[in-house]
Image: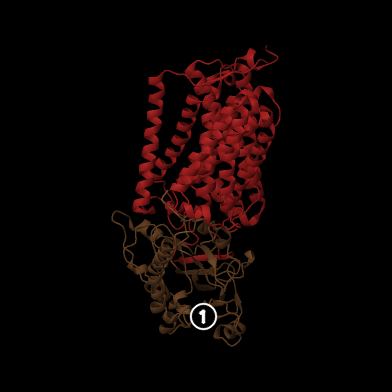
Amino acid sequence: MKKTYFSEWRIESPRYWSILALLAAVVAIGGLAALYMEHEGHWVTGMTNQVVWGTPHVFAIFLIVAASGALNVASIGSVFEKKIYKPLAPLSGLLAIALLVGGLLVLVLDLGRPERLIVAMTTYNFKSIFAWNIFLYTGFMAIVAVYLWLMMEHKMNPYSKPAGLLAFVWRLALTTGTGSIFGFLVARDAYDTALLAPMFIIMSFSYGLAIYLLVLLFTFNLEGRPLGEAVVRRLKNLLGVFVAAVLFFTLIYHLTYLYMTGKHELEAFVLLHGGIYTQVFWVGEVLIGGLLPLAILYHPALGRERGWIAGACAAVIIGGFSKLYVIVIGGQAFPIQMFPGMKVLESGFYDGLVAPYAPSLPEVLLGLGGIGVALAATLVGIRVLRFLPQSLADEVVDPQAA
Amino acid sequence: MSKTTDQPDQDRRAFIGKAAGALAAATLAPGVFLHVTADAAYRQEPVTSKVRWGMLIDTQRCANGCTACVDACNHENGMDLLVKPEGLSDDMWDQQIPRWIRKVKVQDRATGVAANLPMLCQHCEYPPCVDVCPTGASFRRADGIVMVDRHTCIGCRYCMMACPYKARSFIHEVVEHKPTIAPRGRGCVESCNFCVQRRDSGGTTTACQDACDREGHKAIVFGDLNDPASDLWQALRKHPSRQIRADLRLNTGVRYSGV
């Protein structure tokens, strides 16, 4: 394998600034949406005292989960010594930080009192998984930043392996923490299971890699950097494995609940008559997010075409949003089983009924703003610093091809 | 340097000392005086775990169609002062307005027996809302009251995700009018606090209990779960009662009989 050289992303200025201006507009609109919600209060959103976490949480959790997954590419190079992944590592670290910042911004701006963030940073209840996550998230950014520096500063390279190992362990802890936000909730039927932690980890593998592959294809294609079959084939095959693993965990989650009589009503809701949640589950999560990308990625002809591979990545991302929508919103919409063995005849607060929820425009715009922040930060990063390898052509990266 | 001695300037020190003292007095005095005047009737010593406030609700005495407890709570805690924001549908308003207590009528699927349950914060001994709160704003007092510190609540709503009883409310709108005893503001979470202002000023009842008694139903008995002489203790000994979602082992402070 030849020595890898890195360079800044050098597409023509007008093109670069147009893309950045577009992202800046998305970010600005997201910011205005957040300002509007904070000024008026959450009554302008679709959230209620029944569905207390709405669309912003779907976006935020998606970005946070994808952030830890985006780092996997670097981990495979540093921790598991796969040489072909090493040139891919800096972009992986950058994306990880950028996605996390985007996700956290959405999460914080959806707080009832975002100006009290300082309280959250100084007053802790250490039994709360949220409190752990504050350390896991900030620690992740710091560790990945140091890891990036060790990788990109030639003299410090020997230290990048232990840093990579720490970052890998930390990212597993981070996604475990994110999954456990739901996994440790005893109140609601859809949560309350340790399975959510490993499922979130495998979801992160899948969503993070899909975003990574899309960004790689986009940046290399736009600039005309050589990107050989060897790298793309490996990444898309790996993505296929992760997509299949997410489907497997989804299957186990539902089989477990189908086995438990007490959870039958929940399963009937998600799988059969939950309206929008049933549709999003089957069409968004299973079909678009699972079966379709699998079919494309492993198709003998389509699986070789960049456009189709990019399409498969987009499908995985749509599937990710769908899955989180069903988990986060569907899990709240399904009525809390407060009185087992009883029928609710009347209630002053909708007991026993499915809670309605429709995303409002400001919520969606805030979420898109978070994505805008993540992408803009990435594009600024690769423009000013040397994150991208000059060539990923087969003869450069693949020992067999050289 | 014009200084001729290495001794510190004593005049300057004295001035700084006095200025600091005056500043401290100016900062603290209003608080101290406010405390003395406004809290004269209030408890002066910290609450202890010798007391555990609790409630027994007789679901068979709780009358069909009666909402006296709900109305009284709304009045006592200022929910009736909230104004629906312009442009908000009645449907959404109904799902966003805070509810500290609500009536639920259930029917046993096997026996067909119906019961009315006023549902409120169950004041668990092991409250999930307190476990999950990142800042500790959701807390349990030594005397068993579970409540929210509105100064440290950041409005993340994790407690609402964790509560098995749908007992908590988020303030979705800007609040113009609020009673002194139950201050509220946009963006924080709140729930029943057993009329904590009454607990701390020597009161022996809650607003919901008073209202139920006034209606002649006497379905609610409030008191000290730790005091064998209390009406609550006596009532609990007399009537078999249960906790809602007892399977979660939260050891609720609110018990129900006749269901």
- Tell me if B186 is positioned left or right of A90 in this view: left
What's under tag 1, amino acid-wise? Phe
- Depth check: A175 or B31 in front? B31
Q: Colour of chain A?
A: red
- Depth check: A51 or B11 in front? B11
Say if residue B259 shows up in the picture.
no
Task: Report the residue marked by disc 1.
Answer: B222
Residue farthest to the left?
A: B86
- Depth check: A324 or A38 in front? A38
Report the quarter where the N terminus of chain A lies. top right
Chain on which label 1 sits: B
- Depth check: A378 or B12 in front? B12
How many marks on residues? 1
Q: Colour of chain B?
A: brown
Residue A86 horizontal/vertical position (percent): 64, 25
Residue B51 horizontal/vertical position (percent): 58, 79
Q: Residue at 48% of width from left, 17% of height from top? A: A223
Q: Is residue A396 above or below residue B206?
A: above
By what rule are the colours in the image chosen?
Answer: by chain
Q: Secondary structure at mark 1?
A: strand
Report the quarter where the C terminus of chain A lies. top right
Label 1 packing within 10 angstroms: few (<14), some (14-19), many (20+)? many
Say if residue B78 shows up in the picture.
yes
Residue B253 horizontal/vertical position (percent): 57, 73
Residue B182 horizontal/vertical position (percent): 40, 70
